[in-house]
Amino acid sequence: MAITANEGKVSQQSTQSTSWLAVILLWVAGIAAAMQFAKFSISYNQVLNHYQIEPALAGASLSIVGVVGLIFGVTAGIIANKVGYFRVLIGALFVGAIMSFLQSLLPSFEWILLSRLLEGFSQLGVVVAAPTIIALLSAPHHKSLTMGLWGTFFGVAFAISGWAGNEILANYDLSGLYFSHALFILFIALVLLFVLDKNESRYRSELPSSGESYVSKLMSIYRNPRTLLPCVVFLFYTCTLVSLLTYLPNFIEDANLTATLQIVLPLVSTTGTFLAGAISQYWLPPQRVAVIAYIGLGVGALLLMLNPVSELHLCAIFGLMIFSAGLIPGAALSLIPRLARNSYEQGNGYGLIAQLGNLGATVGPPLYAAVIAFSGIDGLAIVALIACGFGGLASFLVGRLKPASE
């Protein structure tokens, strides 16, 4: 059914109602942005074969997108508030569409790397602007729910890419995969251009410019516990979850069971993330959800050290750990609009969460790999327990801050 201008346009509505159409479309935009990671993940071997390059270079084409967020995450939050979240979002999506189209032409690998670098800025723009706008378009009694939904975008993107992307790759090769992503991200950019209110005052902080220098702004963001603590909660999640999803299935000797876990565990994590948003909205404050999640993850790590007697027991423990870890981003993302006093703090929070999230995803896997090589599954469990300790402490400290509405 076509959306008319009056139905589709998000206007200056009361904050007591939620613009569900816009929220869902912004979530889809997040999925499209996360596919910038997923499309190179599922096509890794084809990139190696087509360009005849070393695995390290192919790996660089995958990781360079995240490196941009690691370096410029907080900066993106500052810029987005100044330029405008709507402009940043739409511009980032158009840049992403152009880069995917260029990749579909299969240029030299140097151009591929350059396009991936620019995709990193595109992805960062979306993950800073989209959740900020979602929070602003969500009624107070829906914010945790919409943040829980937003937190699932990465897992959903990989699930869709593993299903439809592999099918496209098998039938239409690299060009078809990248071109289909270009069409998808262009489509959602055009839809959002039509649906979202173009009045930037709707999405930007009403605070006047403080005249602070760039460095002073950065330091104030890092010193602000309302911005920092939810992101620290998120940091120890990304450090751990990426590693658990990568290494846990390798401890199962049955090849079929291992393959099943590689499909099921990401879905378990995504389920936990959405459920955390619902729990945070209707039953428990998000900081308590985060504390419980880290406790559940720690219990699973302790059970691993008891040497389970069967692979089925191992799988049950893996499920507990992944589900508990999946609760954490739903809680952490819900904390940002709960604690932020204005859209400026919200944007800074999402920029910092992108930066620390990429830091955790970058540091975690090699750290876990080194410990596993030295002491096996017990080493993995010990590092997970340490991460739970720090993440749980950050979650406890968040609980000492008053929500912005109080």
Image (tube, grey):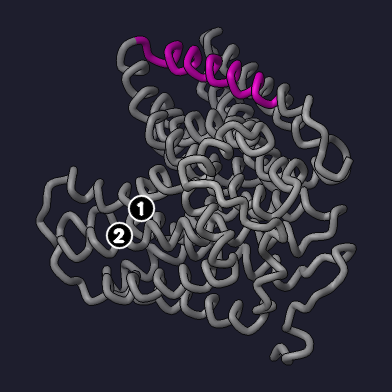
| Residue 319 in view (yes/no) | no
Magenta segment: 375-395
Name, please, the residue furthest toward the front.
211
Look at label 2 and name its amino acid. Answer: Arg
**At which x and y percent is residue 402?**
82, 33
Q: Which residue is painted at 59% across and 81% down in the image?
A: 193
- Is residue 298 positioned above or below 80 on the image? above
Q: Which residue is painted at 13% across and 67% down in the image?
A: 108
| Residue 57 in view (yes/no) | yes
Query: Which residue, given by chain and number where applicable, does mark 1 sit on?
Result: 65
Query: Which residue, given by chain and number where applicable, does mark 2 sit on?
Result: 116
Left or right of 10 on screen, residue 82: left
Left or right of 315 on screen, residue 276: right
**At which x and y percent is residue 271?**
66, 45
The quarter holding residue 392 reads top right
**Which one is nearer the viewer's eye here, 25 or 221?**
221
Q: Are marks 1 and 2 in contact (CB under 8 Å)?
A: yes
**Which one is nearer the viewer's eye here, 142 or 86?**
86
Look at label 1 and name its amino acid. Answer: Val
Q: Which residue is painted at 69% across and 61% down in the image?
A: 134
Give SS at disc 2: helix
